[in-house]
Image (cartoon, rainbow, N blue to C red):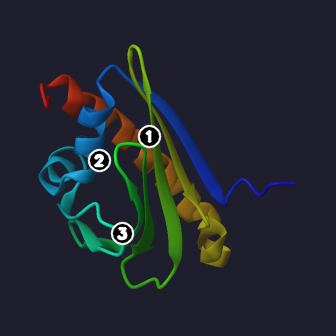
């Protein structure tokens, strides 16, 4: 049986070309516009930070296969807990299918359910914010 607190899977369709969506999730200025303040380079081995109010998320880019897959570690604040976020982009005739997987959440132990709920809400909000960003002429 799969523990439902360990992995979040979000699938979403964007009516935009794959290169446009890739740019939105990898360019630090774009990320800062629709997500949170970012210092980010889509290069394997590159360290990044996302900063929102008093929370910093940091990690390292593990995969940067333009424009198909982006994967990075995800460490919230000084928790020391490392999870993995993977974006897979699939071009279609009508736009881009995205599959976002956030895995390893059980590493939070007793806090896993709380973190799962927080991440799940956060990623759903991000999908909406990314849609709004793309719809407002990011191309």
N-term-proximal mark, 2 vs 3: 2
Indicate which label's residue lies in the foreground, 2 or 3: 3
Secondary structure found at label 3: loop
Residue denoted by label 3 = 44
Q: Is residue 109 left or right of residue 52?
A: right
Q: Which of the pair 66/87 is nearer the observer?
A: 66
Per the rendering, the mark at residue 25 is 2
Give percent across and percent down for residue 90: 46, 32
Quadrant position of the C terminus in the picture: top left
Q: CA distance from mark 2 to mark 1?
A: 15 Å
Count the marks: 3
Secondary structure found at label 1: helix
Indicate which label's residue lies in the foreground, 2 or 1: 2
Q: Quadrant of residue 113?
A: bottom right
Which residue lies at the image location 49% right of the left edge and 54% below the top edge? 86
Which residue lies at the image location 30% right of the left edge and 29% below the top edge? 131
Q: Is residue 52 above or below residue 89?
A: below
Q: Quadrant of residue 42?
A: bottom left
Q: Is residue 53 left or right of residue 115?
A: left
Residue denoted by label 1 = 124
Task: Evaluate if marks 3 and 1 touch, with contact meaning CB atoms under 8 Å apart.
Answer: no
Other-residue count near label 2 (Cα within 10 Å), few / some / many at <14 / 14–19 / ≥20: some
Indicate which label's residue lies in the foreground, 3 or 1: 3
């Amino acid at each position: 049986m799969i523990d439902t607190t360990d992995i979040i899977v979000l699938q979403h369709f964007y009516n935009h070309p794959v290169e446009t969506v890739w740019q939105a999730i990898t360019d630090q200025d774009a990320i800062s516009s629709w997500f949170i303040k970012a210092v980010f380079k889509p290069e394997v081995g590159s360290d990044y930070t996302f900063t929102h109010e008093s929370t910093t998320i940091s990690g390292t880019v593990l995969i940067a296969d333009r424009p198909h897959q982006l994967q990075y570690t995800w460490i919230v604040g000084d928790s020391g807990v490392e999870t993995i976020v993977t974006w897979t982009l699939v071009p279609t005739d009508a736009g881009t299918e995205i599959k976002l997987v956030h895995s390893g959440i059980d590493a939070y132990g007793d806090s896993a359910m709380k973190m799962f709920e927080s991440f799940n809400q956060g990623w759903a909000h991000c999908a909406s914010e990314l849609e709004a960003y793309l719809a407002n002429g990011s191309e």
